[in-house]
Image (tube, rainbow, N blue to C red):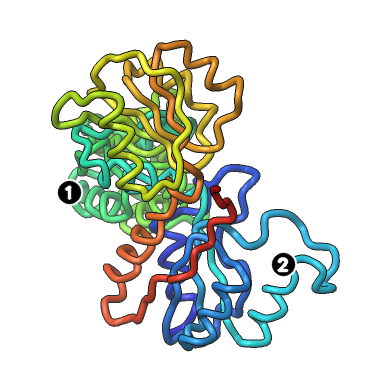
Amino acid sequence: MKLKEITGYLDSVVPLSLQEDYDNSGLQVGDPEMDISSALVALDVTEDVLNEAVRNDCNLIISHHPLIFSGIKKLSGKTYTERIIFDSIKNNIAIYSSHTNLDIISGGVSRKIAEKLNLQDVRVLAPAEGKLLKLVVYIPEKHLDQVRDAIYAAGAGVTGNYDYCGFVSQGTGSFRGGDGTNPFVGERGKLHFEKEIRFETVLFSYLKSKVIKALIDSHPYEEVAYDIYSLENNNVDFGLGCTGEMTRAISEKDFLKLVAEVFNCKGLRFSKLSGKKLKKIALCGGSGASLLGMAIASGADAYITADIKYHTFLEAENRILLIDAGHFETEKYSTEILNDLIIKKFPKFAVRFSKTNTNPINYL
């Protein structure tokens, strides 16, 4: 299998356009045309992980955290990043990463945490903004199904857990073909009126090119009349963090024990206990301190994330139980998401979970 087959698939199901501006997801090292026999899935790319890939004859490492975050001006082997790049090229091992885009997709990192805690009625905490578009296109009546089906097949028309969402209205379109035109209906140089359907649907911005191509390819007109609008509403099922409900209310101490057990935490940091029962839980894998206000506004009783600073614990102000469960601990299940995505598309492709503990934090 060619590397580009796997990376192209991952780029489509975990769109690179969803990543944060500071991020560097995607293919880090490797020739897209190289042959890939097996992959090692890991949270981080370290020298130990690379050596593990070499020992197991894996010529692709797929990670959550990117190896390369910022620009590299020299390759002298002075940093671990430079050494890994050297050794990966020497051993013909490609490196691919899905980072904040894997956090943001509907079935992403925070959803996986919610799944591990068996939370119900899971909803996105901070919906991605500016990612929703509306498409309006005018179609001759007899070709509505043909064009509409092509647009839906390209991924448009999804709202929450519903798909094939659209609206149609009837009207009359007019046009006159100029010199060099070849009208599908009517005659060149003559004003023509045609009964048409105005079809409207929504799509995610990262699907724009794919949907427009499907529209153009399926539409019978030589020149297709369509409009694209940016929508202000955030009626999307992807973004950062999520909320969910416990199957029953639980004490704060029992919940802390549950979190420690589920994520195998060596230690938990948390805000002052209030003594109340917990039912609604907010969470965000990795560094999610910036979403504390949204977690409180959502009515959550507790918020799980990582990398919490001293003063952020003060901001909780007994309004919510704030829990720092660790960056590694809250993101380690990202490997399961990546594995499941690959196996779904390439069921016979060999994928191995890394056994290397890449957590750089130790506890006494």
Residue 80, numbered circle: 2
Residue 18, numbered circle: none
Which residue does the image show at 53% across and 56% down from the upper left? 359
* Figure check: 72 above or below 171: below
> Residue 61 location in percent, x, y?
51, 73
Distance from disc 2 to disc 1, alpha carbons, whole Å, reads: 62 Å
Q: Amino acid at mark 2?
A: Tyr
Q: Earlier in the sequence, mark 2 or mark 1?
A: 2
> Residue 295 location in percent, x, y?
40, 22
Which residue does the image show at 21% across and 26% down from the upper left? 250
Quarter of the view holding residue 355: bottom left
Closer to the camera in the image, 219 or 232: 232
51 on left or right of 261: right
> Residue 310 location in percent, x, y?
60, 24
Which residue does the image show at 27% across and 36% down from the upper left? 159
Which residue does the image show at 35% across and 52% down from the upper left? 215
> Residue 341 location in percent, x, y?
33, 63
Q: Is residue 189 visible?
A: no
Quarter of the view holding residue 135: top left
72 on left or right of 89: right
11 on left or right of 70: left
Mark 1 Cα shell of 10 Å, populated few (<14), some (14-19), many (≥20):
few
Q: Is residue 94 visible?
A: yes
Q: Which residue is mark 1?
A: 142
Say what secondary structure mark 2 lies in.
helix
Q: In which quadrant will I find the N terminus?
A: bottom left
Mark 2 Cα shell of 10 Å, populated few (<14), some (14-19), many (≥20):
few
Count up the numbered dots: 2
Q: Amino acid at mark 1?
A: Lys
